[in-house]
Amino acid sequence: MTVDHARRLVPALRHLATFRVDLGIDALPVVRASLDARRREGVTALDARGVEVVDATTPESMGHAVDVRIYRGGPVPAAVVVYCHSGAFVLGNLDTDHRQCVELARRAQCTVVSVDYRLAPEHPFPAALRDALTVLEWVVEEEKSLGVDADRLAVAGNSAGAALAATLAQCAAVGSAPAVAFQLLHQPVLDDRRTPSKDEFDDTPGFDGVACERMWRHLAGGGELPADAVPARLADLTGVAPALITCSELDPLRDEAVDYALRLMWAGVPTELHVFPRTCHGFDSMAPECDVAQALFAMQGEALRRALTD
């Protein structure tokens, strides 16, 4: 990251200026192990009082069995959110966005079901999407046993997980997935094409332009990536669920988030967009106690509460 870019970060994030994520194929095992260890420590350290946390698995009768983590933060029957974690399609597990799920469940007083989807490149597209669809269908089928209200169902995701969430909302709009009332997309991966922000932020912390290119190649698994793997390539967004889209100013993914929000609005979809100035990709994971991360959590919780209870 250049000196000028580093100075553009808020002071609470400047210690991250030299942090990089290497998504080279040879580096993936080490990067995965390091991320998993850090997030596992975060799960142990986090005080989740007020939120019941249990692990479960979808039945094999629905296809590939998918591990999930359920966060109960509200009275039964609760509004429910199917959540897909970050990790560029190649990193992460149920520990990755544990903090984010606790915050959503607590602040929105809802149930969050986090998806441990399969990772590329070992499991290229559409494996992760199929896992997310399986969990979405399972939540609807098991709403009584889970203590949730499937009529108040949202999807949410962080980074690559937001790509899955956005695709779930698209599938719901055309009837190939259960109905979705709201979508919450944070720092979303949405487009495999070049943008000005990808060109500008080629050495930013958390995520950079090089990582963007490698991420999509990994998702393709060495083959051609079909258009339906890329949310921004859907021509008509009419009828998809209302959205809150949040992103960072100093993020190669910034422009595709802004573009997608505009396209949703042009399609008549109620959409709220917030660009957090002077932040980088993953700021809420790398510095969750800082003021800007807390502001993000408050915004997301209020948006979910409003969308699923009003």
Image (cartoon, helix red, strand yellow):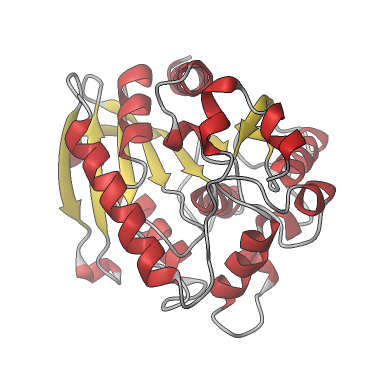
Up-down: is 243 above or below 137? Answer: above
Image spot of residue 249 (x, y percent): 71, 33
Image spot of residue 171 (x, y percent): 56, 55
Q: Residue furthest front?
A: 3
Residue 9 or residue 43, whichever sits in front:
9
Q: Residue at x 31, y 62 (%)?
A: 33
Q: Residue at x 74, y 60 (%)?
A: 233
| Quadrant in the picture for the N terminus | top right
Residue 134 or residue 34, whichever sits in front:
34
Q: Residue furthest bottom?
A: 223
Tell me the quarter of the picture where residue 274 sits: top right
Q: Is residue 185 left or right of residue 224?
A: left
Question: How many numbered tags mark residues here?
Answer: 0
Q: Is residue 300 left or right of residue 56?
A: right
Q: Residue at x 17, y 37 (%)?
A: 44
Residue 75 or residue 160, whichever sits in front:
160
Up-down: is 307 above or below 257? Answer: above
Q: Is residue 174 left or right of residue 66?
A: right
Tell me the quarter of the picture where residue 187 sits: top right
Q: Residue at x 64, y 42 (%)?
A: 240
Q: Is residue 31 visible?
A: yes
Image spot of residue 163 (x, y percent): 57, 52
Residue 305 or residue 97, whichever sits in front:
97
Image spot of residue 10 (x, y percent): 61, 22
Q: Is residue 270 visible?
A: no
Q: Is residue 307 left or right of residue 78?
A: right
